[in-house]
Amino acid sequence: MGLFSNSKKHDDEEEDLRPHVLFVVGAPDSDYELVGKSIKLLGISEFEKADVVETLNYDVLKTLKTDFSSINLMPENWEKTDLLNVLRQEIREFAKKELTGSGTVFLSSCNLSRTGSLWAEELKNCGIETSFVLCFARPDDNYLPWLVYNLEAEKASRGYKRCFIHLSDFLGNWRKTMRKTQKTLELEFENWFSTTREQEIEDSVTGKNITRPPQDKKPTPINVRRLYSGFLDAAKGKKYDESVTEEIIPDIKLFFAPLIQKNTEISELKKRLSKVENEVVDLRDKMLQPDDDMYEPALEDGTINKARAEGEVLYLEQWKAWADERRKRQDFAQYPLFTLGAPLADEVAEIARDIPSNPVIILDVMSPPITSVGTKMDGRNIHVIPISPYADEFNGYLQKAGIKAPVPVIKISPENLVKSFGAKSIDIVHCREAIEYVKNPVVVITEMLSVMKDSGAIFLSHQVNKASEENFNMLAQWNCVEKGGQFIIWNSWYKFNITRMFAGVYEVQAKSYIDFVEVIIKRKPA
């Protein structure tokens, strides 16, 4: 096991085995997880119940009503507020139960950049020593989150053993960087002479150490330059000048002012738009929504399979034409979703902010050739898995068009989610305009609920009454509609009130927006 040690060896073995927790923190772009993986391979155990720590972190942020997207600094003197007394007790109880007998462990988390001071204080009260590894990268253009994470991490780690690791230094010579870390924190890495472990680190570093394409030069704000310079000096072994942080914090409000103004304007526009949408939805409901005992005519049962088969051919032809059109135009750069790093869709990002897991695993069910979910969210690590029974056709279309999907679609049927992924393995299940196409929507939704974690959610978005609009002559054989806040899937023979069907265990929230309906399904609190 990797242990902290003083410069002089202790004869008392029990003192060497006192509990220690090493927090490996940093902004999402700092590759703190890569540093954590290297520390693990060099012989220090990673704490296995990281999800519990993240849940407590999010409870802290919720209690303080702090922005989960990490664009706001923590409130002044937030650690002293009585609002956190219950959470302080939970942290102490958790630490006494899980950490006091664990020897030396580490935990890598970007959220601990913000909440680390509270954790360090409560662990200290439990007799647990705490140290910090602050990972940071060169600021590119996302300056506000970069400042927030690094300023908070610097403040949180004051008074504790800490070291600064610059990503560029680590990728350039990880052995030198880790030996410096070992010396600064008085660590013992016991796997230095394990060729296998060192090769694993080398492979990980090689995979990350890719030359990035040149970016447009933008003027870097002076406060960003100052903080980066201070961190660089600290990474080289100099003592960090804490006055830099204290001088930057008041000035950082200059960054927030235009953002706050923009958010206020957007919020006002959303309120006005929502009012108009509600009026349109009420009018549409009177015209389109079926009454409980009235259904629109559909195809005879014997012709459904034929309609689905013909609709499937047309569905694939439409996607083939879509790919061919982009091959002819060759304007891939105009489509953000074609690149790894496209922002997470707003409605999905809103759900992801409440998910405690890290990374957040998103399953895109019945995905198009290029997933519409997106792949990146500030402050969170996102792992998207797009699936479709038509994956082979989709990937073939893209290959012929010269389009490389950022995340290739995998061939998996929506009726086989549990078999493919296992129970309670997914944080967010996403399905957009596709439930209408499956043979049995209740079976598919049940599969979605089975793979969803207890803390997860399902997000559905579908065109209202699409099957009826197409006269049941296409692939869609089911209508989706919201009525009185309830989510209903129906055709001429069946009517499934999804809200009522799963009301005992799950909360189903449905809302209409002019011509489509959005649904969020979550497990009810125990």
Image (tube, grey):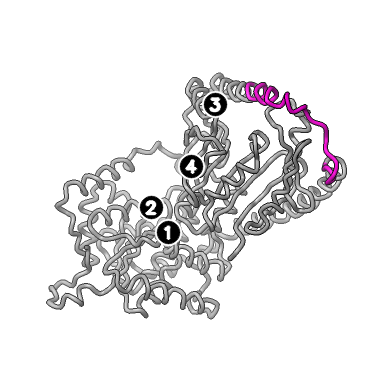
Three-letter residue code for mark 3:
Asp
Q: Mark number for residue 419?
A: 4
Q: Residue at x 57, y 20 (%)?
A: 324
Q: Amino acid at mark 1?
A: Cys
The structure residue drawn at horizontal position 26% and vertical position 60%, both measured from the top left corner, is 44
Q: Mark 2 = which residue? A: 30
Label 3, label 1: how many angstroms apart (C-alpha)?
36 Å
Q: Which mark is residue 331?
A: 3
* Dot label at residue 110: 1
Precedes in sequence: disc 3 or disc 1: 1
Which residue range is magenta in the image?
289-313
Say left or right for 262 vs 467: left
Q: Quadrant of residue 298?
A: top right
Provide the secondary structure element on which disc 2 rests: helix
Residue drawn 71% across and 32% down? 477
Quarter of the view holding residue 336: top right
Q: What amino acid is at disc 4?
A: Lys
Q: CA distance from mark 1 to mark 4?
A: 33 Å
Circle 1 SS class: loop
